Image (cartoon, helix red, strand yellow):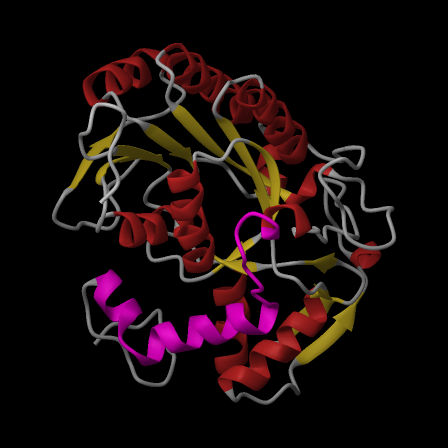
Amino acid sequence: MDFNSKGKLMKIGITGASGMLGTALIDELIHKHSIFATSRSTGFKKKGVQWQCFDLTNSEKLHKWLISTNPDVIIHCAAVVNVEECENNEELIKKLHVDSTKTLANYLNKNKKQLIYISTDSVFDGEKIGKYKELDDVKPLNAYAKTKLLGEMPVLLMDTGLVLRTNIIGWNVFGKNSFAEWMLKGLIESEPLNLFSDVMFTPIHVSDLSQMISRMIDLKLSGLYHCASIDSLSKYDFGIKMAEIFNFPIDNISKISIKDANFTANRPNNMALCSAKLNSVIKCKSTSYDAIKLMKNQYDNGWLSRIKGTKLESDYNFWRDK
């Protein structure tokens, strides 16, 4: 068990806890910490998890939650990840990505507690050849990336603030399908999948990231770190790899360029992150293959059924409950 400075079991707050990462964090951390979860709606229910649902942009309710829970650590996962939605609602997104982060950072720094802020690989312009390191210049191209980058700043000013830039995949137990789930559903139903061959990324599974965050809490790690798979690949190659691992044909997968996409928001071509700095502290050699394989294993071994609280079809039709 991990204890705070007063010798008591550590209290971990998780914002955006009903999301993909929040769910994995609860499943990972509940065995050794007291969990205080918040989101707009209740997510994964497990003994020992205390849920309180409210809008994080409501600063009064956020302050009350902080005072009532008095957490030793908060993992700030809450974000709007729909890039197009962010582009059309920048002021509202700023309240969540920046203002709520400032409130958390101010409270926790004043009380000498830790804040772990989940950032994004989208803070770069994508012009670099190769993977981005923590010291590379940032140049966000859209409102999502700009506001997430602004949210990093108050955390890095803290004595015990930790910023993790990452790109996650996994099972999104509540709400909309994740990127990997969308792709898997397309493979199962033989829907046309037009995937970018010129967009590079370094995806990591949320369960692997959750284990690493647990280690970071133990080590009281602070600063800026990239947390990613050790290999980079295109969205197209990711789709091919997913089809191979889940044993589906690739006939419905086509290569396209991001230049041909009709997006309102600009996006970087290269989002690949170098996580050598973090790997020098926490040994993690996860690959994109490992991340996809873990998704499959979690379905096959009943993990996803347990998290969802219902029996699932045996043929990866994850959106259909028995």
Disc tally is 0
Q: Is residue 304 magenta?
A: yes
Residue shown at the point (21%, 23%) measured from the top left? 6
Compared to 113, does 280 lie above or below?
below
Residue shown at the point (70%, 73%) measured from the top left? 237
Residue shown at the point (33%, 41%) measured from the top left? 17
Compared to 108, does 249 lie above or below?
below
Compared to 41, does 241 lie above or below?
below
Residue shown at the point (50%, 19%) measured from the top left? 159
- Residue 208: x and y, percent? 45, 59
- Quadrant of the image occupied by residue 298: bottom left
The segment highlighted magenta reads 279-308
Q: Which quadrant: the C terminus?
A: bottom left
Q: Is residue 318 magenta?
A: no
- Quadrant of the image occupied by residue 55: top left
- Residue 144: x and y, percent? 62, 34
- Quadrant of the image occupied by residue 119: top right
Residue 277 located left or right of residue 139: left
- Residue 174: x and y, percent? 33, 53
Q: Is residue 191 visible?
A: no
Residue 77 located left or right of residue 44: right
Q: Is residue 196 visible?
A: yes
Compared to 91, does 32 lie above or below?
below
The residue nearer to you, when weighing 126 against 48, is: 48
Residue 179 located left or right of residue 238: left
The residue nearer to you, when weighing 141 against 107, is: 107
Magenta segment main secondary structure: helix
Q: Which quadrant: the N terminus?
A: top left
